[in-house]
Image: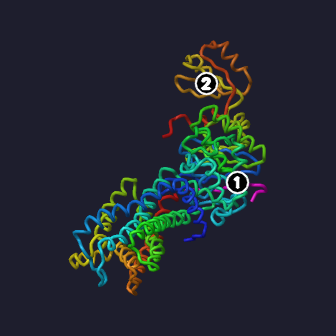
């Protein structure tokens, strides 16, 4: 396997009866990087990471985690993983502190070490003062931070996060991001699924965008934006016939959504100026291209349910 | 099926929770036998008079006290591994969280069932203390109630977990409650001797695990040790040996996808 690969997936497949949830996915996660799995609902992100932490057996393909085969050495792998699942499954029968201590026991950590680790982690997530609270008393953001802390209890070599900030308000989300950046700074390898493009841009060194069980594209966020979309985007609300014609005639990279025309381009504000001169800037918005543009361009705009 | 002693981790988790609320869990096994013995033993017992069991004559209180323990053993294992386990599995997602650690599904289910049996043993010990105050348990034979509580707890816990693996929702537990647990409670040789039933009903009652648990509990409480008790103990062991792996396999099918 490749030098320094923490996860190596080759032709990974998962079917549930007739439904193929993951359909031949390959990627590598390198040591020390934050790797993102992006995709709309039902893309196969969660199924993929469930195979990585052994919750779902692999239907077909090769999957090595920390250099070990998930098929044969799952237990050894699991000792070195930290997993923060999508749903809050903190133990409501236990206090904040006990949630960490009981989890440490699942990893066979000795009592004294677990106590010290619990203290450190509560300090890390800024929740020392809540250590005796029950889980039900915590806010959504606190629960998430505690989920992250719990995933770190065994000092893992790989942290897996399944949509770590879904459902959080912006303040809580930024707090989680700061903690994850700190962990990344400390050299921890992180695998993250998300459908927040801002989150992926901010945290991920590299990522794949998945849809319908397949990988559509892989790369560094900024590179992907440049290659797939360009530098800037003009959004025109209620475009005129003239603006539409211009986009088509000049063979500009564009999407016509009917009530909205989106033009992608590379040349700074040059194109924006020309369109403005020719058709007026009424309803035109010039902005930087983002990962969200790449995402929508690749996965389409229809709703996924 | 690979089950290591890691199941103890799951058992410990339940013990940690239990220690937070032990004072609530302690009340029913202490209070219930007193209420039953007053209502049935003193109240109904006056009408019933003496009861014949294994050739000896006993008071009605002596007759039903061990049955109350047997019923508590059944409830301990069954309720813990139906309603309580279902809540942990389905609502709290506790098993999902455990599955992201080195624990395997086999160890989680084993830990749950052994915990249910542990609750049976704790409740039995508490009830024995109370019932002994009435002088209704003979010692040292009565101490055999404790290992029997463990065996019975494992048998009924496995049965409970079997249902937990297959019920679509928590309301569905009403069905095994109504079809299995309540009939056993009434017809398992608990409140009247099986000999008063028609022969076919006696035979049917012998198929019920509670009947065997009651026979064991009663014999030990009254100090009657006999070789035929081994048959009842073996029945419970086989019952557990069938439903335990069945529960594990069905639970795996339910949770691992």
Residue at 46% x, 77% y: name it: B144
Nearest to the observer: residue B21 or residue A165: B21
Give how far across and how far down residue A114 sits, in percent.
Answer: 70, 55
Q: Nearer the viewer, residue A173 or A140?
A: A140
Q: Which of marks 1 and 2 is in front?
A: 1
How dense is the environment of label 1, judged by Cα within 10 Å: few (below 14), some, or many (20 and up)? Answer: some
Residue drawn at the location 30% of the way across and 80% of the way down = B53
Q: Are marks 1 and 2 on the same chain?
A: yes
Q: Are marks 1 and 2 in contact (CB under 8 Å)?
A: no
Q: Is residue A207 above or below residue A260?
A: below
Q: Give the range drawn in magenta.
A: A1-14
Mark closest to the chain's N terminus, 1 or 2: 1
Please identify the quarter of the rendering in which residue A301 is found: top right
Give residue B159's position: percent from left, percent from top: 41, 67
Disc 2 secondary structure class = helix
Which residue is denoted by mark 2 in the rendering? A248
Residue A115: image tag: 1
SS category of the residue bearing label 1: helix
Q: Which residue is located at x 63 percent, y 12 percent?
A: A280
| Main secondary-structure element of the magenta-colored stretch | strand
Residue at 62% across / 28% down in the picture? Answer: A254
The answer for how far apart the CA atoms under marks 1 and 2 are is: 66 Å
Q: Is residue B138 magenta?
A: no
């Amino acid at each position: 396997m490749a030098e320094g690969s923490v996860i190596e997936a080759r032709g990974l497949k998962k079917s549930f009866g007739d439904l193929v949830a993951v359909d031949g996915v390959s990627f590598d996660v390198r040591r020390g990087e934050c790797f993102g799995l992006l995709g709309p609902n039902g893309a196969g992100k969660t199924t993929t990471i469930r195979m990585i932490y052994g919750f779902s057996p692999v239907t077909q393909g090769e999957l090595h985690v920390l250099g070990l085969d998930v098929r044969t050495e799952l237990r050894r792998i699991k000792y070195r993983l930290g997993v923060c699942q999508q749903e809050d499954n903190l133990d409501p029968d236990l206090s904040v502190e006990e949630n960490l201590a009981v989890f440490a026991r699942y990893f066979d950590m000795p009592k004294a070490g677990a106590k010290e680790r619990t203290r450190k982690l509560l300090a890390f997530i800024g929740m020392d003062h809540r250590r005796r609270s029950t889980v039900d008393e915590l806010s959504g953001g606190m629960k998430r931070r505690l989920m992250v802390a719990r995933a770190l209890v065994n000092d893992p070599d790989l942290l897996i996060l399944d949509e770590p900030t879904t459902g959080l308000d912006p303040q809580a989300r930024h707090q989680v991001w700061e903690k994850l950046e700190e962990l990344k700074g400390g050299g921890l390898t992180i695998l993250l699924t998300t459908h927040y493009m801002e989150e992926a841009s901010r945290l991920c060194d590299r990522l794949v965008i998945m849809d319908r069980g397949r990988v559509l594209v892989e790369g560094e966020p900024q590179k992907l934006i440049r290659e797939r979309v360009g530098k800037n985007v003009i959004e025109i609300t209620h475009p005129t016939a003239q603006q539409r014609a211009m986009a088509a005639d000049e063979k500009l990279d564009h999407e016509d959504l009917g009530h909205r025309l989106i033009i992608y381009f590379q040349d700074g504000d040059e194109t924006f100026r020309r369109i403005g001169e020719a058709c007026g800037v009424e309803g035109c918005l010039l902005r930087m291209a983002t990962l969200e543009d790449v995402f929508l361009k690749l996965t389409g705009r229809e709703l996924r349910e | 099926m690979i089950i290591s002693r890691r199941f103890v981790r799951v058992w410990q988790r339940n013990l940690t929770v239990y220690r937070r609320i032990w004072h609530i869990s302690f009340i029913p096994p202490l209070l219930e036998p007193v209420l039953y013995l007053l209502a049935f033993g003193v109240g109904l017992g006056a009408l019933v008079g003496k009861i014949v069991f294994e050739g000896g004559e006993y008071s009605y209180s002596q007759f039903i006290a061990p049955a109350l323990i047997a019923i508590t053993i059944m409830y301990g294992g069954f309720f813990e591994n139906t309603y309580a386990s279902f809540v942990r599995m389905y609502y709290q997602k506790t098993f999902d969280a455990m599955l992201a650690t080195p624990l395997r599904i086999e160890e989680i289910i084993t830990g749950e069932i052994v915990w249910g049996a542990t609750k049976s043993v704790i409740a039995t010990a508490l009830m024995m203390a109370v019932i002994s105050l009435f002088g209704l348990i003979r010692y040292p034979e009565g101490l055999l109630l404790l290992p029997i509580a463990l065996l019975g707890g494992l048998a009924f816990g496995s049965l409970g977990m079997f249902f937990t693996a297959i019920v679509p929702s928590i309301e569905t537990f009403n069905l095994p409650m109504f079809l299995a647990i309540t009939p056993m409670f009434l017809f398992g040789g608990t409140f009247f001797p099986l000999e008063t039933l028609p022969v076919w009903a006696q035979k049917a009652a012998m198929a019920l695990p509670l009947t065997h648990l009651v026979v064991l509990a009663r014999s030990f409480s009254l100090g009657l040790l006999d070789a035929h008790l081994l048959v009842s103990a073996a029945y419970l062991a086989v019952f557990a040996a069938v439903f335990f792996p069945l529960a594990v396999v069905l639970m795996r099918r339910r949770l691992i996808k």
